[in-house]
């Protein structure tokens, strides 16, 4: 491997960019400067929407014919918090004891550097069986509202009549060791906010007031104690977590006029956002009485059934790491929830042990191995696809 195609060196360049959502800080310039000399056509696009920050995005493609294998990811990172808590500046990457430290190395600049280097090595090796295209879809809006990023890039591609056949997202998927887990789907996410109304009064005269709290507590108990399902073939049971309860009461002798709570549901493929919304509204009507229930679904449950993409990725992981990965649907949401609408998608990246934490880091050896896994995935993919087409 030449220095030019070293994924660790490219990771370090990306980590020097303080690209806290929605600021790009030069990270897409780094990628464009790496990709264009290889023959990638790079398109930069800035998307806007009232009430949200503008976001710069990059779509790069090598080749013009099908099949189009796409690597997807995000260069934006979460804030580092108190920099004094870090052992080194989060935007001045350092290698210590075989670990590369810097904000975003795990989530997910290390993976982006790995698939860029993998694509570079694969393209320059000019394999006879490579007949197709390799693309990269990179956003700066994954850690933020996710409005002016991947979703709008996919719309841009559709308007151009450009298709993606399979997509691999470089999210950190492994709990402890590289090669443990591939994500072939994700649970949906629903956020609820209920406000139960009452009538304020003196706590010594409860009969003259209407206390909303017993109804709120009854509703929340029902949410907490009612299982929604037992899971499905590829998904664990749906979970519900109460995240906030508040009455805004500063006195001990006042019955409040309202009580409110927030909750989050991570749901499997037994449900849709719409079906859960109807169920929650029914429970609200039956239990909470005079109240308002606001619901926002940030992503639906989805599954890419085991098949070509997971097969070749698993084989590449086994070849490099010596282990067969678990095909999982656990964890939070990602931009794969948008990509699944246009093509089969899986996720595989570095370990997530330190993602979003102080002293975020990744093993240098893991970054090299991840890039090798991505390169083998390209080799297996185009070999299989071209054999099928022939």
Image (cartoon, rainbow, N blue to C red):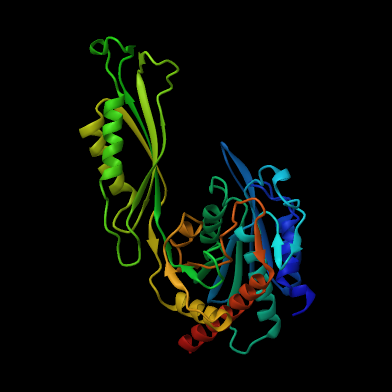
Q: Position of residue 340 (x, y in %)?
A: 44, 62
From the viewer's perspective, tell me whether residue 272 is left or right of residue 97: left
| Quarter of the rendering occupied by the N terminus | bottom right
Q: How many marks?
A: 0
Task: Choose between 234 and 65: the one closer to the eye.
Answer: 234
Residue at the spot x=68%, y=64% of the render? 42
Q: In which image quadrant can residue 120 be found?
A: bottom right
**Residue at the farthest left position:** 286
From the viewer's perspective, tell me whether residue 288 is left or right of residue 116: left
Residue at the spot x=42%, y=66% of the render? 328
Residue at the spot x=42%, y=19% of the render? 249
Q: Position of residue 238 (x, y in %)?
A: 33, 54
From the viewer's perspective, tell me whether residue 216 is left or right of residue 3: left
Task: Choose between 338 and 389: the one closer to the eye.
Answer: 338
Q: Position of residue 250 (x, y in %)?
A: 45, 17
Is residue 79 something that shows in the picture?
yes
Q: Position of residue 284 (x, y in %)?
A: 26, 34
Task: Choose between 345 and 153: the one closer to the eye.
Answer: 345
From the viewer's perspective, tell me whether residue 89 is left or right of residue 236: right
Is residue 278 something that shows in the picture?
no
Q: In which image quadrant can residue 12 be found?
A: bottom right
């Amino acid at each position: 491997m030449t220095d030019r195609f070293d994924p660790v060196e490219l990771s370090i360049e990306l980590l020097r960019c303080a690209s806290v959502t929605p600021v790009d800080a030069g990270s897409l310039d780094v990628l464009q400067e790496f990709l264009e000399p290889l023959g990638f056509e790079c398109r930069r696009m800035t998307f806007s929407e009232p009430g949200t920050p503008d976001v710069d995005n990059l779509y790069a493609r090598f080749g013009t014919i099908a099949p189009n294998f796409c690597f997807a990811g995000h260069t934006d990172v979460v804030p580092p918090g108190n920099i004094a808590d870090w052992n080194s500046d989060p935007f001045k990457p350092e290698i210590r004891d075989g670990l590369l430290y810097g904000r975003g190395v795990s989530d997910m600049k290390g993976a982006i550097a790995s698939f860029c280097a993998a694509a570079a090595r694969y393209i320059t090796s000019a394999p006879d069986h490579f007949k197709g295209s390799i693309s990269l879809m990179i956003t700066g809006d994954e850690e933020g509202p996710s409005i002016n990023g991947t979703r709008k890039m996919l719309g841009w591609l559709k308007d151009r009549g450009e298709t993606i056949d399979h997509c691999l997202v470089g999210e950190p998927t492994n709990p402890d060791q590289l090669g443990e887990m591939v994500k072939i789907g994700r649970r949906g996410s629903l956020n609820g906010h209920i406000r139960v109304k009452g009538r304020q009064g003196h706590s010594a005269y409860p009969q003259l007031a209407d206390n909303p709290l017993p109804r709120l507590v009854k509703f929340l108990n029902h949410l907490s104690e009612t299982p929604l399902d037992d899971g499905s073939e590829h998904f664990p049971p749906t979970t519900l977590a109460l995240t906030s309860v508040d009455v805004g009461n500063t006195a001990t002798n006042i019955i409040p006029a309202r009580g409110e709570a927030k909750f989050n549901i991570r749901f499997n493929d037994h449900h849709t956002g719409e079906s859960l919304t109807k169920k929650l509204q029914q429970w609200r009507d039956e239990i909470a009485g005079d109240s308002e229930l606001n619901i926002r679904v940030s992503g639906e449950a989805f599954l890419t059934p085991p098949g070509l993409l997971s097969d070749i990725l698993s084989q590449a992981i086994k070849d490099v790491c010596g282990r067969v990965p678990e095909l999982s649907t656990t964890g939070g949401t990602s931009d794969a929830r948008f990509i699944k609408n246009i093509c089969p998608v899986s996720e595989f990246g570095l370990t997530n042990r330190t993602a979003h934490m102080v002293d975020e880091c990744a093993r240098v050896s893991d970054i090299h191995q991840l890039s090798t896994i991505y390169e083998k995935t390209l080799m297996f993919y185009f070999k299989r696809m071209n054999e099928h087409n022939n």
